[in-house]
Image: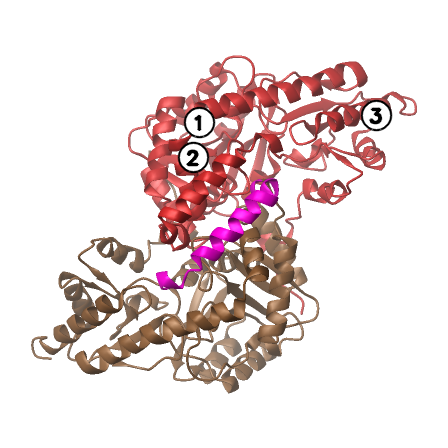
Chain colours: A brown, B red
Amino acid sequence: MEYRFSDRVSNLKPSAIREIFKYATDPAVISLSAGNPAPDAFPVDAVRACSEAVLQEQPIDALQYSVTEGLPALREDVAVFLKQHCSIATPGDAVLITSGAEQIMDLLGKSVLNEGDTVVCEEPSFIGALNSFRSYNAVLKGVPMQEDGMDLAKLEEILKTDKRVKFIYTIPNFQNPTGLTTSWEKRRGIYALAQKYNTLILEDNPYGDLRFAGEAIPAIKTLDTEGRVLYAGTFSKTISPGMRVGFAAGGSALIQKMVVCKQGSDVHTNIWSQLVIHRFLHGWDFEKHLKNLQKIYAQKYAVAEKALRETAPLLAFRPIEGGLFLWCTLPDSIPMPAYCKAAVLHKVCVVPGNAFLTDETQPCQSFRINYSSPTNEDLARGIAILGELAAKWPNA
Amino acid sequence: MEYRFSDRVSNLKPSAIREIFKYATDPAVISLSAGNPAPDAFPVDAVRACSEAVLQEQPIDALQYSVTEGLPALREDVAVFLKQHCSIATPGDAVLITSGAEQIMDLLGKSVLNEGDTVVCEEPSFIGALNSFRSYNAVLKGVPMQEDGMDLAKLEEILKTDKRVKFIYTIPNFQNPTGLTTSWEKRRGIYALAQKYNTLILEDNPYGDLRFAGEAIPAIKTLDTEGRVLYAGTFSKTISPGMRVGFAAGGSALIQKMVVCKQGSDVHTNIWSQLVIHRFLHGWDFEKHLKNLQKIYAQKYAVAEKALRETAPLLAFRPIEGGLFLWCTLPDSIPMPAYCKAAVLHKVCVVPGNAFLTDETQPCQSFRINYSSPTNEDLARGIAILGELAAKWPNA
């Protein structure tokens, strides 16, 4: 039969990244397109031990239905971690365990967005979040990213003129896709503007724990005294994305509404994985584990940086201090879409930068590289192929 | 700060069941209010063995990101099971693995419902699904349940006059909350009406494998030749609800749209649990496991039925042939809401029937009992307390 889709989603397309993944499954192709953590970063032995203990000692807890808010002990772990590790302790806040941080985008969208409402986001930004907001028929307004975060003048211009802004979406640490980090000044500026124009902030911090250089900058959430910031965190980058366990911290009235929405969405997050993560946080040294991850990422990044400098000098990029992504920009003489297609034919996959724009049809000279998933050899070889492709581009 | 919620969800409240759960956590209270599978029905040893094998042999597969559609091997398992076990094999259909069957309600809602569109459902019906549809601002129109399923004349009346019906929602086997099973004639009738008025059917079948008496009736989906029926299944009742693994089978264009929506919702379902279920289906005898479950449920149901007949003769109920629920109806002289509240004070929790209505404010003399979660002793004692409460009701 002919399906009649809702107006919200009829124009929603599979993300460009997913389309590229189809090529990336060819084992001959070097994929620099994923957003996957480094496979050797997974604490496999610890997960096995924790899971065995859970299934031994509390099998029914792990297999039975559970509460929508999330395992109370894990919510407490998250609250303690946020307080001790990140100095986040907004009075009146609550914690919700979600099925990955992506679900936070979905639940916030459902909770606050009427069709036609505006979400202000960084330009470019994380395509998964943008698509989630699009699925509620939100209007996306992008604020260009500068070296130290959003252009605050442009942000204020939007907030001043658009009365339908429901929230500002920002990834302050090692942003996806640019790798940029928002400065402390700009974090304070974003919070001040959100206060002035009375809007929410969705602070998405999946990569903050993957800092391998420079000094940590406090979260915007640390400035929050009134539940204005919904903070999104995840265990996807630090323990396992396959488990789909994320967490939101925000004003309890907002969290309560998100709980009601989650009830009608997936009832609760896989409780077995929640119990395993809870055990991991208690039985293992999480801080030491994070340090180990940071070491792994520093080493991999060094490989990528060296290869870029030595074998791909035509690709401009900004050095990063953490996260999973590098943002490469081509000289004007090389058209980015044609270049990315040619790269696939040369067996290297990257993500065309326009995929991350609020309007994909806009021109863009950049593309995203992931350095964490491939082996060091593939990483160096893939970048060298990209470099050669640029160097040999006709008339480049 | 004062939150401004979307129109869709501003009136959405936590379900009455959840509110009752708060009392149910009191260990002195006998909870007949949950929808939990019997704890002794969980294949704990098999899950442990499968999980150990997965983490031993393919730990990175289990912990890394995976594809939104679901583990290809598990999708194939589901397709084979549906074909061999249920005679479901609509040409052109695809399978999607979801985070529990509840997510199918959410993804279908997002995919097809514009605000103000109509969902036709059984009256009473599963509150989780109703709330999911409500969260897209759908209009719910209830069709009264008769002994053998929906009143088809009433169903046609709605389909004939309401041009905004997007789908019919039905639970043909051991319906939640009534325990009723839709006859083969009515299944054919529902399909014929859906064809005549060109609407979709969402066939939700969480309990079909829990039949302990009578003859199985083919799914509506077996009649489907054109992708008109979206079939929702789950491993929650047969393996573990805590894992949150469900599956949808439907026309591939519809499934594709749901995949795009799932991408923006939770990216993919916990892949560790998907791999464990895949191993379980191959390493263990699933048919034998189902037979064992049916035996467990038959025994528990016998306890409930005996207790109702012997100790609670004022509670009218229809015998069931499977599933998790019994629907009890009070004499007109006992007001149901007051009775359910009094039951809590007597340390027995049930779910007031009006919670399952499209309009909760309508009068209702029934309440739902779950017989699968409590121990046999608690079950018999709980029902006896309910019987005594009815018998001693003033002026009853």
**Up-down relation of residue B138 to residue B226 (above or below):** below
Relative depth, front residue between B57 and A356:
B57
* Residue A166 visible in image: no
Numbered circle sitting on residue B334: 3
The residue at 78%/22% (across/down) is B330
The residue stretch that appears in magenta:
A36-63
Identify the secondary structure beneath mark 1.
helix
Distance between the Cα atoms at labels 1 and 2? Answer: 8 Å
Instruction: Report x, y in % for residue B42.
Output: 55, 33
Q: Residue at x 33, y 57 (%)?
A: A15
Pointer 1 or 2: first along the chain: 2
**Is disc 1 in the same subunit as disc 2?**
yes
How many numbered discs sit on the rendered protein? 3
Residue picked out by circle 1 = B286
Measuring from the top left, give residue A374's x and y in whole percent. Answer: 28, 64
Amino acid type, label 3: Ile
Q: Earlier in the sequence, mark 3 or mark 1?
A: 1
Nearest to viewer (mark 3 / mark 2): 2
Q: Quadrant of the N terminus of chain A?
A: top left
Residue contact between numbered discs 1 and 2, judged by CB atoms under 8 Å: yes
**Chain on which label 2 sits:** B
Task: Say above or below: A228 vs B256.
Answer: below
Query: Where is mark 2, residue-wise?
Result: B280
- Judge whether B250 appears above or below A328 on screen: above
Residue A317 horizontal/vertical position (percent): 28, 80
Task: Provide the chain ID for the residue under circle 3.
Answer: B
Foreground of the two, A16 or A348: A348
Q: Name the mark nearer the viewer: 3 or 1.
A: 1
Asked whether, in this view, residue A42 is left or right of residue B152, the answer is left
Residue A135: x and y, percent? 44, 55
